[in-house]
Amino acid sequence: MKSKSSHIYYYMIIPAVVLFFTFHTYPALQGIFYSFTDSKGYGTYDFVGLKNYINLFKDGRVLNAYFFTFKFAVISTILVNIISLILAIALNSRIIFQKLLKSIYFLPLVLSVLIIGYIFNYIFTYLIPDAGKAIGIEVLSKSILGNPELAWIGIVFVAVWQACAFNTIIYLAGLQTIPVDLYEAANIDGASGWQQFRYITFVLIAPFFTVNMVLAMKNFLMVFAHVVAMTGGGPGRATESISLLIYDGGFNGAEFAYQSANAVIYFFVILIISIIQINFLQKREINL
């Protein structure tokens, strides 16, 4: 009977393993292979060794994409965690229309990133400038997405607004694990609201904070759809993310092998950043 059960187990996992290998692992291995060639994505190719990897560090477009992506990811990660934690604390307290507010806050989570991006593209391009002209505010009379120095702010705003929904759910789950008795005891001892947050709330939700920080950074480093829908990487290349560069250069620019090398490097960059985050934040959990 035990042997039969183990066979059923293998029958259940083999299809999943085959599908995962076919559509994930095998293409990834192919990408690594092609990164050592001069393939354009079609036709014949020759091996070039580490040439693609060396050229990436000399490419100004690649370096600019890395700079924008890291700037975007760091600022967005900080903002989304601050805002989400504040929202979670507010939603976890006894406020009027609590269920309605939760539904409103979680709405962005169920909407498509592209749909949201196109909606805000219209808002930033037409509605806000028209409103700025109508009320005579020159700063608002021009689209922020058309300004090379400010376009990234619009993308950060939309990305943070949408990401807050998921992070708030995680923080809410963490807050609900904290016994109410701790806050009652702190009130009796005369602890202020900030002291309760610093020494009770923030300490006990430390594991949830770690999860949110790592996932948020990883997701923002891989930003793609927001950029495609709102700016397409422009104006010029001011908001071109690494993911967009890999896609555009690999499939539209006949740089398949070159951008495959870029993708390999970026995979390890994200992996290293995630490992550093986890190690640092887990040490913080222990020291709190």
Image: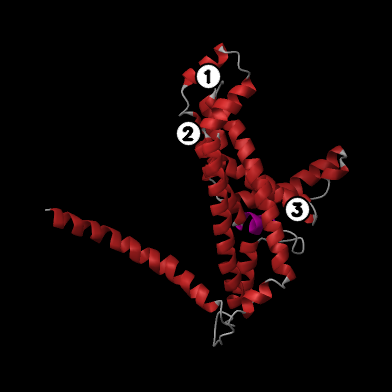
Q: The residue under label 2 is which amino acid type?
A: Ala
Please state which of the two labelled residues, at mark 1 or mark 3, is closer to the viewer: 1
Which residue appears at 48% of the width and 26% of the height? 178
Magenta-tinted stretch: 224-231
Name the residue beneath numbered marker 3: 151
Q: What whole-number distance in Å separates the C-alpha atoms at marks 1 and 2? A: 17 Å
Q: Is residue 41 above or below residue 104?
A: below
Which one is nearer the viewer's eye here, 99 or 224?
224
Q: How many marks?
A: 3
Q: Is residue 28 above or below residue 12?
A: below
Q: Are marks 1 and 2 in contact (CB under 8 Å)?
A: no
Could you tell me the amino acid type at mark 1? Tyr
Is 229 a magenta residue?
yes
Mark 2 burial class by Cα count in 10 Å: few <14, some 14-19, many 20+: some
Give percent across and percent down for residue 25. 43, 67
Q: Is residue 117 visible in the rendered structure shown here?
A: yes
Q: Is residue 97 magenta?
A: no
Point out residue 211 in the picture as x, y percentages from the top left corner. Answer: 52, 44
Type of the residue with mark 3: Ala
- Which dot, 3 or 2, sits closer to the camera? 2
- Evaluate whether residue 254 shows in this view: no
- The x and y percentages for residue 196 are 59, 23
Rounded to the nearest angstrom, the CA distance separating label 1 from label 3 is 43 Å
> Which residue was labeled with disc 2?
173
Q: Main secondary structure of the magenta part?
A: helix
Q: Does 202 appear above or below 70?
A: above
Position in image of residue 238 (x %, y %): 75, 60
**Residue underneath mark 1:** 183
* In front: label 1 or label 2: 1
Q: Nearer the viewer, residue 262 or 106?
A: 262
Question: Which class describes the residues within 10 Å of circle 1: few (<14), some (14-19), or many (20+)?
Answer: some
Q: Earlier in the sequence, mark 3 or mark 2?
A: 3
